[in-house]
Amino acid sequence: MEEKEIKGVQEKEDAASGKIGSSLFENMQYFHDKLQVDKNFDIIYKMTLVADKNACIYFMDGFVKDTIMQKLMEYFYSITPEDLPEDSHGLSHENMPYVEVDLLDDKEEILTNILSGVLCLFIDGYSKCFAIDCRTYPMRSVQEPEKDKVLRGSRDGFVETVVFNTALIRRRIRSPKLVMEMLKAGNSSQSDIVLSYMDDRVDKKFLAELKKRIENMKVDALTMNQESLAECIYRRKWYNPFPKFKYTERPDATAASILEGKIAILIDNSPAAMILPVGIFDILEEADDFYFPPVTGTYLRVTRFCISVMTLFLTPVWLLLMQNPEWIPGSLEFIKISDPVNVPLIAQLLILEFAIDGLKLAAINTPSMLTTPLSVIAALVVGEFSVKSGWFNSETMLYMAFVAIANYTQASYELGYALKFMRLIMLVLTAIFGIYGLIAGVIISMLFIALNKTVSGKSYLYPLIPFSGRQLARRLLRVRISHYYE
């Protein structure tokens, strides 16, 4: 069989198996059709010459700088036929003026690379595509997160570009044991997912299970980034509001969790890391605890824990005492309501619970230039006149204002709303059944926490259950960092 016939048979086999051939015309015909170049203004192809061979470059507008394209084109025009190797590997290693160059032959993989912003070069006579990763991402500057602020410490935060996020972690952990493993998910989105962990400290069994769950996900797109991934990873006990994941926008907190043996999941287009597996004590920890001396850090941690407990019990206990004023000791007589009660206390508390959430949503969507005047209106008009009109008593407004503000003492939105849901259950049960309802609400809340499991299937209350005194002390108290001496 002649050489041309052998080559033709090989190209037919490649086409049937999803591989590209060596014919530039056929490759362009296929990718023009798949990428709909005639419809998509931002998918650009450029014809050029590499030595004496025709070539075509596909790339996404906005991902490649003009200066880089100009340098590449100048270099390709400068190559002579004598300098051109016969095979793709030789050309990739000897004549490509860029560091990150991959050889691809799978059509679907090439399509994904082009749509991800990678510059793909096809040369007539070569059966491989040269994927040149010279992307420059549109991104905002690295700055301190709005939510995870600290009084002292680093002021950088994650951005929406996963490569920059991994670099921020690498900057803090300069160890060859740190692994950044790339996966993809979503049939349409093809989202980049990075698993970051210490190879010598991570739970290998859980890591293998997590990778298996991600690889076996059947989802069209991770439209909501971490939340979409979390719902695919953990499908059990969706009704339990206590969070199974910890989210942070701080690279220092992420690096600390990785060094403890946990896994950090980074998703492209998301400025936050998802830490797992975590329990209730992991979620209550914050970076501020470690940027101060042990005594101060312990005080901050204990204060945060006590206030979180108060937000859960303050209004239900106060409601129970208002229903049974004879239980109030003489020294606490001042907590009694002095003005007439026109609306039942339970109705006031429930209305305020929902009204506070409404104000939060309104604050999120309020233009920044109107924030101050609207805050004044809310404080003076809504606050003062709601009391004067008789809808609410001043004591009810006071306790609910404390609860609303105290919810922000810890950074986890999910934990804050979990405590809110438990508080609503306790309020309703206390209003209906009195002391027995409060006890039932406490038991229900404890069961929600105790029966919850981490993503790895372990106890949510570790190191309390199963008990580990040393680890529990480290969770409740800010202990000194261990030192190693020769």
Image: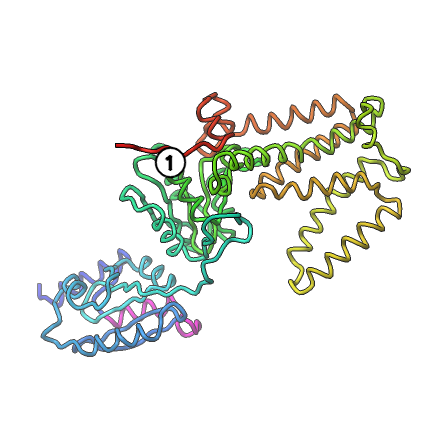
Across and down, in percent, residue 213 comes to 41, 40
The one nearer the camera, 330 or 29, is 330
Residue type at mark 1 is Gly
Label 1, secondary structure: give it.
loop
Q: How is the image coloured?
A: rainbow
The one nearer the camera, 473 or 364, is 473
Is residue 34 highlighted in magenta?
yes
User: Label 1, on which residue?
Assistant: 261
Quarter of the rendering containing residue 93: bottom left
Across and down, in percent, residue 33 comes to 37, 68
Q: Quadrant of the C terminus?
A: top left
Overall secondary structure of the magenta stretch?
helix
The one nearer the camera, 77 or 12, is 77
Task: For label 1, count other residues whose C-alpha is less than 10 Å away and answer few (under 14), some (14-19) or many (20+).
Answer: some
Q: Residue at x 41, y 70 (%)?
A: 62
Image position of 485 (left or right of 388): left
Quarter of the rendering containing residue 127: bottom left
Is residue 151 highlighted in magenta?
no
Q: Can residue 228 be seen at all in this image of the molecule?
A: no
Image position of 440 (left or right of 332): left
In the image, the segment drawn in magenta is: 24-42
Q: Residue at x 74, y 40 (%)?
A: 400
Across and down, in percent, residue 296 comes to 52, 37
Q: Residue at x 46, y 44 (%)?
A: 274
Q: Quadrant of the N terminus?
A: bottom left
The one nearer the camera, 135 or 153, is 153
Quarter of the rendering containing residue 480: top left
